Amino acid sequence: MKSTTLFRRAEGFSLLELVVAVAITSMIIVGITTIIFHLIFHREHTQDSMIASEQLRSAHYWLSLDGLVAQNTEIGDDLETPGNEVLTLFWVGYERRDAQDNQLADLYEVRYLYDGDAIRRIKNVTTATYDSDGNLLDLCSSNLTITVARNIADINIGSDNLSLDISLTAVVNDVENAKSFNISPRGVTDL
């Protein structure tokens, strides 16, 4: 009787098995690479979108803050002042008295300038001091300039008789976001 071997002769993988294994491994690698690429690209896209949205939100905040208290507005550039103005707002702050019983009044002028990329806000506050007879004693001015928003590709300001209609577009890399809003300044009867 012939003895049977406990172990069969070891055989290698067939060519078909190797081709199937390489194909499955390739699909897994392609899938993982695609996922990683989309995660990186989507993160950058999301980040650009968030930056554009934040810039629009900042511009909306400042324009609304000043626009709501304005008593007078001018849309467009007045050629007497430097810069490309898109909007100028005026108002008088509340009056108060100092320790010598002189009356103080703050006069505000806020100009918004657009240079093709950024919106800048120039706030000029002039404080007038009057004696008890109404005679002007002193004028004191201060200026503050801030950049309200960057990456602004377009700004349009229009008005119907009682409100300002503002449209902004921000572009960061290839991501474009737009925002439109309406402001009704206090005490304005006609723009």
Image (cartoon, rainbow, N blue to C red):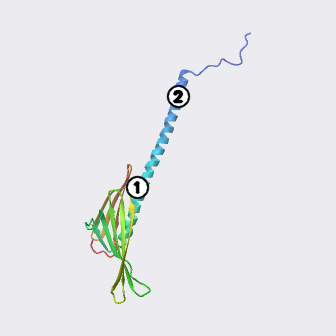
Q: How crowded is mark 2: few (under 14 residues within 10 Å), some or many (20 or more)?
A: few
Q: Residue flagged by tag 1: what amino acid is it?
A: Ala
Residue 136, percent across and down?
A: 33, 84
Q: Indicate the quadrant containing the C terminus: top left, top right, bottom left or bottom right.
A: bottom left
* Location of residue 9 by image quarter: top right
Q: Residue furthest left?
A: 79
Residue that appears at 42% across and 84% down = 98
Q: Work out whether 186 lies above or below 98.
A: above
| Residue 185: image tag | none
User: Distance from label 2 to label 1 (Cα)?
Assistant: 45 Å
Q: In terms of sequence position, does the residue under pointer 2 or pointer 1 come before the other?
A: 2
Residue 60, percent across and down?
A: 38, 63
Residue that appears at 49% across and 42% down = 36
Q: Nearer the viewer, mark 2 or mark 1?
A: 1
Q: Which residue lies furthest to the bottom in this view?
A: 133
Q: Work out whether 107 lies above or below 39.
A: below
Question: Considering the numbered disc 2 on the image, is that residue within a helix, a strand or a loop?
Answer: helix
Q: Residue flagged by tag 2: what amino acid is it?
A: Val
Residue that appears at 32% across and 76% down = 187
* Location of residue 117 by image quarter: bottom left
- In this rendering, would 164 be left or right of 3? left
